[in-house]
Image: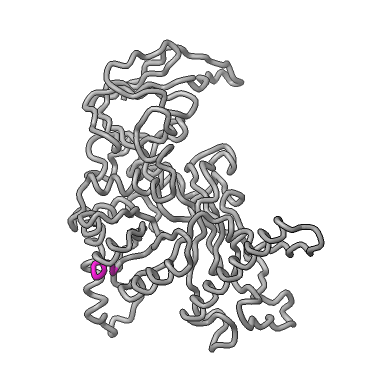
Amino acid sequence: MKFRLLIVAAVLLPFGRIEAAAPSAIAIKDAHVVTVSGPDMPKATILLRDGLIQDVGPGIAIPADAWAIEGAGLTVYPGFINGLSTWGITARESQPSRESATDQRTPAPRIHGPEDRPQTYSFERAADLLTPDDGRLEAARSAGFTTSATFPNRGIFEGLGAMVDLAGERGRDMVIAQPIGQQIAFRMGSGGMGRSFPSSLMGNIAYVRQLFLDLDQYRAAKMIYDAHTEGNRRPEYDHELEGLAESPRILLPAEEAQQIDRILRFGRELKTPFVVYGLHEAYRRVEELKQANVPVLISLKWPEKPKDGDPHEGPDYRELQMREQAPAVPGMLAKAGVKFGFYSDGVDSAADLHKALKKAIDAGLSRADALRALTLDVAGIYGLSDRLGSIQKGKIANLVVTKGDIFGNKDAVEYVFIDGKQFQPAKEGGR
């Protein structure tokens, strides 16, 4: 890799160490550029300035204040986007909640129904929980990821997600856009033996339905009051419903075919934009997903034999079929024209992320469709394709630079740019 620093500002530091100041602009010269939004450019220059792509194309003049990187033999892609994760949020210490006892001598309060708002954190913001110290971020960058749709992870209504960069001086520096949605997770058995609501799948669904009915009434009451304030008592402020009202879309889980059927009906009932995530048995519901015209996020945690499973207890036929067919789902959906993205689902190491993506490609997903599912299409799912997901003038300078095909070699990534800042990925075996 050759660098040509056209203008260098250096500061003499203690102990004789000399450190170059960050360049005001960076140019990647004469590289193969995969724009995703348009045709590839076999030999082009990308100029980065102030965290943005200032220009891209063949024969671009490199300004005198730019740091030029020789791009011959390199390929530049848009940075990968994780469609759903907790990247950037470190594990938090256990906090008392409305479901737990505040004193070990006092039994936990019984949750009788939706009016008690069990497991509801709809107001919590991923943007307020971010830290660049999350140890998973370096591994993600090494796999070509620069960006993540990050959500909190507790309760049924898990909170307001944010689209974040995977680097920054502080957590707030990482935020690209928020809120981008509200993730809903169905959590069964929280009360045990039906002692607390909701303790079943149907209880979860009923609770979610009730909260959206409450939201409709809450909005109506506020509209009526705003139109007729005189002589009317103001509606009570509702923290949980305010968080839900702020969500531009909701994310609903569906892994198996029957769950997909249920969630497609349920999502339409809620009358709010929704995304379905999971989808490992979607090979049974490709046509239904196409007709529904709903965006989906496919888990990269492919079904496999449990590592700690009972060796004497064999899987049933349906489980075996899902292990075999799940990696083919992305290719099937791509051919059907269903818009989808990928999400990590706990697959966090660079090697495992690369392996999971390659498994989908080996099962029939084209490299072009895989790239779109990791870039422009997933940005579009969150309404952010105007700033992310492709290499275009004016977009955020999130790029991944490789030697060779990014899907063909787990060590292909040479470096990534996030907000125009360069990061060198860790390589296996050191480097």
Q: Is residue 186 left or right of residue 34?
A: right
Instruction: Estimate the x, y position of residue 130 in percent, counting from the top left.
Output: 57, 48
Q: Residue at x 45, y 55 (%)?
A: 85
Q: Which residues are magenta?
A: 281-285
Q: Residue at x 42, y 16 (%)?
A: 66
Q: Residue 218: which quarter of the image?
A: bottom right
Q: Quadrant of the N terminus?
A: top left
Q: What is the total number of numbered labels drawn onto the structure image?
A: 0
Residue 249 visible from this viewpoint: yes
Front position in the image: 225 or 6: 225
Front position in the image: 78 or 410: 78
Q: Residue at x 79, y 64 (%)?
A: 233
Check the image and report above or below for 204 versus 150: below
Q: Is residue 6 left or right of residue 38?
A: right
Q: Residue at x 36, y 64 (%)?
A: 278
Q: Quadrant of the C terminus?
A: top left
Instruction: Estimate the x, y position of residue 173 in percent, counting from the top left.
Output: 57, 38
Instruction: Estimate the x, y position of residue 223 in percent, counting from the top left.
Output: 66, 59
Look at the image and say whether residue 283 sits in the magenta stretch.
yes
Front position in the image: 53 or 238: 238
Look at the image and say whether residue 399 sits in the magenta stretch.
no
Instruction: Estimate the x, y position of residue 12 in percent, counting from the top left.
Output: 58, 16
* Colour style of the rendered protein structure: one colour
Q: Residue 64: which quarter of the image?
A: top left
Tell me which secondary structure the magenta stretch mostly adopts. Answer: helix
Q: Is residue 191 left or right of residue 283?
A: right
Residue 402 visible from this viewpoint: no
